[in-house]
């Protein structure tokens, strides 16, 4: 029995082989003595890197006879036999070896096992080929061949940071609905709540402050996480609020802490921990009202921004994408939306200069303020008082003219 190992260099590891890494076994005889040749005379196990994918490998078994390979490739070979014949295990100290998921196939006169997932740095993998499980093997104890591969841990590159947390204001309503956490690079999924804490004035963790969802609410690029405060700790006359109390309390200070141990998509910890300290004001149960908004008209024939004061801070992600500018023909004006003044002022930078004429600011009624109130509908809707479940109109239109 021998062991084959890879050679690694650079940012990521690549086994320094394209051919044989491990040689084992000398002549295992076939059960059928009348056969002109035994199913195999010698077996070779090797780890082979996948081109352009530095942490993917295949495990190859060569030296098997043509008849044996034909049997393995036939529909008569039960799929349940594959793991008994050739398997790969992940080995970690103090933990029972775990079998890897992957696919077996016969190709180019070789038996190959391809792991379903890339190999992880810092882990050791053991491959086991059991010759006794081959078709027409002389005995089930014909011999087991083993090779290991250890993937060295990558040097940690702690470059990812928390770039912004919304709401950005220092004073937040008692019934705040959610935070948005923005990162400088894609983050890893899973166990996110282990790295986020909400501390009270005494610097003690608040009990169960967040709505811990199994399906984490990441943006497509995994650079923004939506973190909901448990609605049961916000809505009045519901059990969590009555039994545990509100997550936030008016008149008190709190700190949101994001721990440095959180890993990015490359497996590296954050460069630094992040804290957001804020004061809690009274609850906001007043739906946003665009009729109370004011705007500052930009000069025509310039690309100066249109500025809209929304009367109070709004949900950062929704305000950017739920407010639009249309020209006199009803076409959307191309440009970029920005939020300023602690998400209270919405600004629009047009791609082209403003032309004189009539315009319309279109606001989707699903837009939210910091407490989750929509236009025309508070977050805490009392259905028994006849309040509608949703508004019939989907937008509010605010005309304005540039001269």
Image (cartoon, helix red, strand yellow):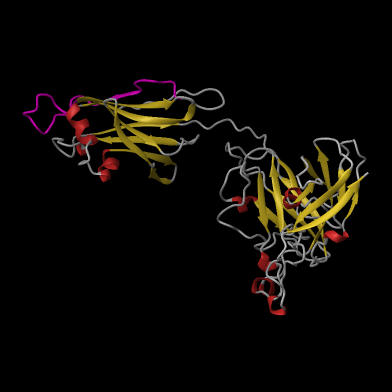
Position of residue 287 relative to residue 331, above or below, is below
In the rendering, at what x and y percent does residue 323 appear? 77, 51
- Please name the residue shown 71% across and 50% down the image: 180
- Please name the residue shown 42% across and 26% down the image: 49
Viewer-proximal residue among 57 and 222: 222
In the rendering, at what x and y percent does residue 81 appear? 25, 43
Q: Name the side, left or right, on which 62 lies relative to 297.
A: left
Viewer-proximal residue among 361 and 357: 357
Q: Quadrant of the C terminus?
A: top right
Q: Quadrant of the N terminus?
A: top left
| Residue 199 highlighted magenta (yes or no) | no
Position of residue 301 relative to residue 206, above or below, is above
Q: Name the side, left or right, on which 203 lies relative to 30.
A: right
Viewer-proximal residue among 20 and 388: 388
Predominant secondary structure, magenta span: loop
Tell me the quarter of the picture where residue 103 sits.
top left
| Residue 20 highlighted magenta (yes or no) | yes
Q: Name the side, left or right, on which 113 lies relative to 396.
A: left
In the rendering, at what x and y percent does residue 179 appear? 71, 54
Count of residue discs: 0
Magenta extent: 15-40
């Amino acid at each position: 029995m021998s062991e084959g190992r890879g050679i690694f260099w650079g940012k990521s590891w690549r086994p320094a082989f394209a051919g044989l890494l491990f040689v084992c076994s000398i002549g295992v005889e076939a059960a059928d003595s009348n056969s002109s040749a035994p199913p195999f005379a010698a077996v070779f196990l090797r780890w082979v890197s996948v081109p352009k994918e530095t942490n993917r490998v295949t495990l190859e078994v060569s030296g098997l006879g043509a008849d044996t390979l034909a049997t393995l490739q036939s529909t008569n070979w039960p799929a349940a036999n594959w793991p008994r014949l050739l398997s790969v295990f992940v080995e970690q100290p103090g933990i029972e070896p775990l079998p890897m998921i992957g696919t077996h196939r016969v190709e180019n006169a070789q038996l190959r096992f391809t792991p379903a997932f890339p190999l992880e740095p810092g882990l050791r993998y053991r491959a086991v080929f059991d010759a006794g499980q081959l078709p027409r093997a002389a005995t089930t104890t014909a011999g087991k061949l083993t090779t290991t591969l250890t993937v060295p841990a990558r040097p940690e590159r702690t470059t990812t940071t928390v770039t912004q947390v919304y709401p950005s204001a220092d004073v937040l309503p008692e019934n705040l609905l959610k935070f948005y956490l923005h990162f400088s690079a894609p983050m890893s999924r899973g166990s996110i709540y282990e790295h986020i804490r909400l501390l009270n004035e005494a610097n003690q963790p608040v009990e169960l402050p967040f709505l811990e969802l199994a399906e984490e609410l990441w943006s497509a690029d995994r650079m923004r996480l939506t973190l909901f405060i448990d609605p049961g700790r916000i809505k009045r006359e519901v059990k969590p609020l009555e039994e545990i109390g509100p997550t936030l309390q008016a008149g008190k200070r709190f700190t949101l802490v994001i721990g440095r141990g959180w890993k990015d998509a490359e497996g590296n910890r954050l460069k630094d921990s992040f804290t957001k300290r804020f004061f809690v004001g009274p609850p906001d149960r007043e739906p946003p009202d665009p009729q109370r908004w004011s705007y500052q008209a930009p000069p025509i024939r310039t690309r100066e921004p249109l500025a809209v004061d929304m009367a109070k801070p709004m949900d950062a992600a929704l305000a950017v994408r739920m407010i639009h500018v249309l020209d006199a023909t009803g076409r959307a004006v191309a440009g970029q939306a920005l939020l300023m003044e602690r998400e209270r002022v919405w600004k629009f930078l047009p791609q082209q200069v403003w032309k004189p004429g009539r315009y319309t600011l279109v606001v989707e009624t699903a837009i939210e303020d910091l407490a989750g109130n929509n236009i025309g509908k508070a977050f805490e809707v009392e259905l028994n008082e006849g309040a509608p479940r949703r508004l019939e109109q989907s937008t509010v239109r605010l005309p304005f003219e540039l001269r």
